[in-house]
Amino acid sequence: MSVTRVAIVVGAVVALLVATVPGPAIASGSRPAQATEGATVLESVQPCRLFDGRATPGRGRLDAATWRVQVAGRCGVAADARAAAISIVATATSAPGFVTAWPSGSIRPKVSNLNFDRNNTVANSAVVQLNESGAIDVFASAPADLIVDVTAAFTDVQGGGAGRFVAMQPRRLVDTRRSGRSGADSIVVPLPAGVAPDAIAAAVTVTAVDAAKPGFLTVHGAGTPLPDSSLVNTDELNPTRANVAFVPVTADGISISRSMPTDVLVDIWGWFTGPSAPATNDGLFVPQAPARVWDSRSSFDPIHAGGTIEKTIAPPTASAVVANVTAVEPTGWGFMTVTAAGTFQPDVSSLNYQWRQAVAALTVTRNSDRGVSFRSHAGTHVVVDVAGWFVGTPIEATAPRGRNPLPAENERVLFVSDSSLAGIRWGGALGWLQGASFDNRLESCRRLIGSSCRGREGYAPPTANDELASVPAGAFDTAVIATGYNDWSGLFPIGLDAVLTTARSKGIQRVVWMTYRENVGYSAPAGAANRSTFIRNNLTLEAAVASGRYPELILADWRTYSQTRADWVTADGVHLTTAGARAAAEYTSRKLAALHRRPCPLGIGGPATAGGWCADPDATGPS
């Protein structure tokens, strides 16, 4: 068997550091350079482990962050392979980062194949060219243990019709949420009608949904031995994860082994022909060095909630395209579907995301004469790196172009404060909380946990944790926390964890925490907290964000935003004046609009980004 020098990389944990991997983007409407030479065919191999950094931490190391992995000539991959489907897993991560795989010996491209956060285990797939010796280099931007599995390979065309890709209308093959197959047993997925009996592989997305504990899914040909490899990995913070692979198949289909109880979704995008297929150029794979073709952060065109954007990312001779797609800074939980532009939108998903962590996934999608469509359930920035395409005729686009309007003001916000921002209520500024549906619980002398003190209105309010515990699950998208001026610094980390844990249990997707003013004369009742306490509590908040344990936590830097405006606070430096009450309400409204990427509220206004949504007030400062 021979294989082609390209590797599909499965592996990934999600991290914000995709933001540190900018690359050249193709302007809207332009096309990558066409390539008619170097077309290859797929040859299926049994999934096999090539490299495990946990077992051999020094093997193949080129420097502190880079490993060389030999692919060709191992695990059934032919010595003259030019490309290979591989899986990369990042685990035991100690800081946010990303992984890039590319042909050995060449300059590392400005792309990423997977993203991870601290204490993650994640996998993703990709297509990576091999060098003349059949090897790849793998780089991790932060300390992590890496695992590399091979799942398929691409070789030069030798004659015959095997190994050519046949794109299908995407369809869902399995959904154990509806079939009652949830659990930890293995699942056999028969091939659908239209797939030839002698097909050698299929392009499928496999999704673990609401896994009961951290674990992994292994996918292989039905009836073949269980390989020592993984395709999808979940962890405590990300129990729903998806990944695409070119999976070897048998006449009985594919088998999915679950190491943990979880629901499973399987979507098919196409299949690879067997020996009985006629020889043709259609379906041959043209690998390329990975290239960034779209980064919505620099082009200011993210996908908004429920929106669709079409992009040209492949040449006009491509019937399908292979790309790594990364969702960056999602505004909520959701999924993205990547399909041919102007065609029927199927009920399938290409990648799943939550929190604000970056999530990368290999995609294999048909190409139309209008390009490729990106549709997202929630708002998200998008980064696309193309790894190659399949030769053929693009499908005709017949449907109207999708729309991508800025989001509506439908965010549901629970606002919980102590007396520091209760001045919004006392100062008659509640009307300046705009752009979302606010449930305002602004009280004096509130604490995070334990017992609140008796405030200026003659009663002790519920703690912030109790307020969150009292709301129905699913009632709010966002919680704003402006409580903590009455909390001892020694108990503050416990209160922080309790509030975030309760918010998570209520399905709150984002917790926006106001930082504490530090240059103040205020001392809490009974001397519980003062200036030094607020400094320590801010440090605790910053450490919590950096820890990776709380991906829903976002700091709203009221400390910095208000520090030069003595007219906004009373003599104690904490409580609001009438002017400060309005300023705090407007700041909160703009901050939430910026996070949701919607326009600044009409009644407030404010600076806007080039994309039309409200600019982050922490970046612009007060007017």
Image (spheres, rainbow, N blue to C red):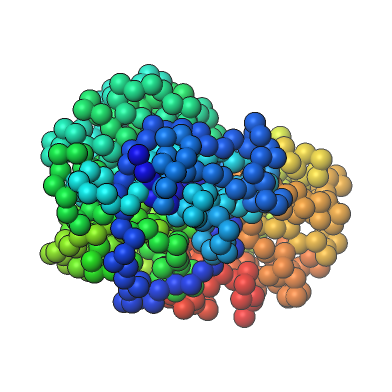
Q: Is residue 139 left or right of residue 603?
A: right
**Coordinates of residue 120 in the picture (x, y in percent):** 59, 40
Residue drawn at x 56%, y 69% is 616
The answer to which image quadrant residue 492 occupies is: top right
Q: Is residue 317 left or right of residue 30?
A: left
Let me know if residue 170 appears in the view: no
Image quarter in which the N terminus is found? top left
Between 263 and 371, the residue placed more toward the observer is: 371
**Coordinates of residue 337 in the picture (x, y in percent):** 31, 52
**Coordinates of residue 251 in the picture (x, y in percent):** 21, 28
The answer to which image quadrant residue 100 occupies is: bottom right
Residue drawn at x 41%, y 23% is 226
Residue drawn at x 69%, y 55% is 419
Q: Is residue 444 above or below residue 569?
A: above
Let me know if residue 193 appears in the view: yes
Between 521 and 107, the residue placed more toward the observer is: 107
How many marks do you count on the picture?
0
In the image as oriented, which residue stretches furthest toward the top? 185
Residue drawn at x 49%, y 76% is 609
Between 425 and 36, the residue placed more toward the observer is: 36
Between 1 and 48, the residue placed more toward the observer is: 1
**Coordinates of residue 206 in the picture (x, y in percent):** 35, 38
Image quarter in which the C terminus is found? bottom right
Q: Is residue 219 left or right of residue 545?
A: left
Q: Is residue 523 above or below residue 451?
A: below
The answer to which image quadrant residue 268 occupies is: top left
